[in-house]
Image: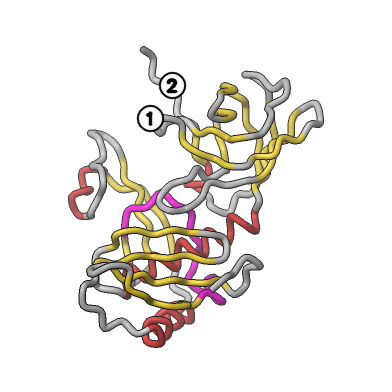
Amino acid sequence: MNTPTPTRRRFEQNAYRRDGQARVVAVTERGIVLDETCFYAEGGGQPGDTGALHTATGATLWVTDTRYLPGRLRIGHQVPDPGGLQAGDTVTLAIDWPRRYRHMRMHTALHVLCALVDAPVTGCAIHAGRGRIDFDLPESGLRREDLDAALQRVIGDNRAVHAGEEDGARGGEYTLRAAPGEGETLRVVTIDGLDRQPCGGTHVRATGELAGIRIARIHKKSRRARRVVLIDETAPEAVE
């Protein structure tokens, strides 16, 4: 059986790319598959992008979610009705940029917390106006005021954030759910002087872009788990 050609993930090369053109590869029950996309596909706690696909006939197809197809090679853009779209057609892509940018801000903020809290991460979730991260921390001396002050210092430092590809053979240096295959690369996100970890998500260029994000609360989820909840005060969806 032939292996399908992977969707080219333009969001990995430039998280700030908001639009583009692509060719339809397939129209499936799991979504419209394109040869390339700037739509981020759900993963790592970050929701899939929403937005629009504009067809050559002038129709607009609203993308309600973006997810990987089984095997994680191709990406499906979920629309209520693909109309007469078919393989070979060209579409113009436009993501919901304000929503995506809030996801980028929150995702980077969670990476900052990974560096500030010396404990294993057991889970996380990212939303447009809020986020949370869970730590394996049985006895917690974490104080919301102290952790938020540390976060605000990092924001004020305006540290550069960048992503790069590394040899997958270096995967043993990190805690990974699955080791890269032979010859595969590993995408690593670095916050200068603070944090370095594998991640396929979208991030801002510098921590100064996180202004307005703060720690809302810290609470105990179980005997071993502590949950840190963040809110983005610049987002209309922000809820404490």
Residue tagged by mark 2?
4
Residue tagged by mark 1?
71
Sequence-earlier tag: 2 or 1: 2
The type of residue carrying mark 2 is Pro
Q: Is residue 21 above or below residue 143?
A: above
**Spot occupied by residue 32 in the image (x, y as percentages of width and height):** 59, 29
Which residue, as the protein is rendered here, is positioned at the far top? 1
Foreground: disc 2 or disc 1? 1
Label 1 environment density (alpha carbons within 10 Å; few <14, some 14–19, many ≥20): few
Q: Is residue 226 left or right of residue 139?
A: right
CB under 8 Å between callouts 2 and 1?
yes
**Which residue shows up at 54% across the image and 33% down it?**
76
Q: Nearer the viewer, residue 109 or 123?
A: 123
Task: State the SS at label 2.
Answer: loop
**Spot occupied by residue 217 in the image (x, y as percentages of width and height):** 43, 78
Q: Which of 46 and 122 is in front in this view?
A: 122
How far is the residue under mark 2 from the one under mark 1? Answer: 10 Å
Q: What stretch is highlighted in magenta?
A: 197-213
Quadrant that contains the N terminus: top left
Q: Which of 181 and 146 is in front in this view?
A: 146
Count the marks: how many? 2
**Spot occupied by residue 185 in the image (x, y as percentages of width and height):** 31, 41
Q: Is residue 205 above or below residue 23?
A: below
Asked whether residue 67 is in view, the answer is yes
Q: In this view, does 13 lie to the left or right of 180?
A: right
**Which residue shows up at 49% across the image and 68% down it?**
206
The type of residue carrying mark 1 is Gly
